[in-house]
């Protein structure tokens, strides 16, 4: 069974203080890893897809990286509007069409 | 550009009542999904429809039924609501089953 563990559960940073969020996964065959952002009272918003170890994707202050066991979401010089819950999901196990989601990291950026 | 639209946004039911959650997408996507999100748990797939005319069970299908009415619409029905079904329900769609999913803003359902 595919498993996803995200850490930390919650993270508070000062504005401009860079950090990383972790997504560790266990799958029988990774076919893709997705990062989403979720604001309170809203649905998840797609950020990135990573398909193979060594791949990196960037968008504004966010950079996602992937290894064979985990993914990191690096946040550089964050702003208060980056405050949200960040979700990781994996698509693995050949023949299984569903995504397995982690429970998320709740990020708060303090002005 | 509405994306994925869910109705209603909020609902309170009594145990044993039935209701249907509606979902419509305007992106011409082939695949559609229903999830539930509970505190401390990741999003869990209830049912999905890889393409028009097909539906399949996800991780937690018990107590639910779905209908893929057409390419745009995918509804979720609770036949006899139970307190354990209190949750936030999200509908999502994707161009294909192997593409990123796009989510609606959810239906917050409380069952007393």
Image (cartoon, coloured by chain):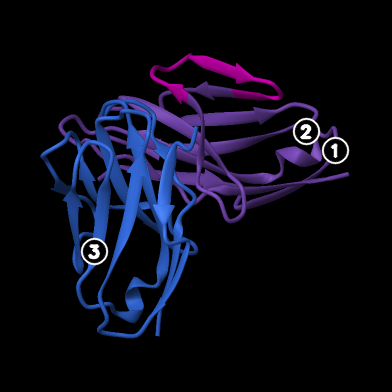
Say which of B10 and B99 sits in front.
Answer: B10
In contact (CB < 8 Å): disc 1 and disc 2: yes
In the figure, A45 relative to B104: above or below? Answer: above
The tint of chain B in the picture is blue
- Residue at image position (37%, 29%) is B27
Farthest residue, direction left? B53
Looking at the rendered structure, the secondary structure element under dot 1 is loop
Label 3 Cα crowd, 10 Å radius (few <14 / some 14-19 / many 20+): some
The tint of chain A in the picture is purple
For disc 2, the marked residue is A78
Chain that bears disc 3: B
- Residue at image position (18%, 29%) is A94
In the figure, A24 relative to B83: above or below? Answer: above
Q: Give the x, y percent position of residue A56.
A: 54, 16
For disc 1, the marked residue is A15
Q: Give the x, y percent position of residue B91.
A: 36, 48
For disc 3, the marked residue is B77
In which quarter of the view is residue A50 placed?
top left
Q: Give the x, y percent position of residue B48.
A: 23, 45
Looking at the rendered structure, the secondary structure element under dot 3 is strand
Label 1 to label 2, Cα distance in Å? 6 Å
Chain that bears disc 2: A
Give the foreground label among 3 and 2: 3
Chain that bears disc 1: A
In which quarter of the view is residue A4 placed?
top left
In which quarter of the view is residue B26 placed?
top left
Label 3 to label 1, Cα distance in Å? 44 Å
Say which of B89 and B73 sits in front.
Answer: B73
Q: Report whether mark 3 lies on the same chain as mark 2.
A: no
The magenta span reads A49-63
Looking at the rendered structure, the secondary structure element under dot 2 is loop
- Residue at image position (50%, 30%) is A71
């Amino acid at each position: 069974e595919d498993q996803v563990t995200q850490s930390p559960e919650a993270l508070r940073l000062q504005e401009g203080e860079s950090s990383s969020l972790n997504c560790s996964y266990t799958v029988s065959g990774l076919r893709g890893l997705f990062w989403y952002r979720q604001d309170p009272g809203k649905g998840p918003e797609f950020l990135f897809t990573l398909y193979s170890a060594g791949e990196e994707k960037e968008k504004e202050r966010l950079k996602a990286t992937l290894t064979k066991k985990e993914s990191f979401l690096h946040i550089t010089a964050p702003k208060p509007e980056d405050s949200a819950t960040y979700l990781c999901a994996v698509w693995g196990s050949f023949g299984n069409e569903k995504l397995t989601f982690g429970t998320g990291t709740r990020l708060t950026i303090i002005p | 550009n509405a994306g994925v639209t869910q109705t209603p946004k909020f609902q309170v039911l009594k145990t044993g009542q039935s209701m249907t959650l509606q979902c419509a997408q305007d992106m011409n996507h082939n695949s559609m999904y229903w999830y539930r999100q509970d505190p401390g748990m990741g999003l869990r797939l209830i049912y999905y429809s890889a393409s028009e005319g097909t539906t399949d069970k996800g991780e937690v299908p018990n107590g639910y039924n779905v209908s893929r009415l057409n390419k745009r619409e995918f509804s979720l029905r609770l036949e006899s609501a139970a307190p354990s079904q209190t949750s936030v329900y999200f509908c999502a769609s994707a161009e294909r089953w192997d593409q990123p999913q796009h989510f609606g803003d959810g239906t917050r359902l409380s069952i007393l």
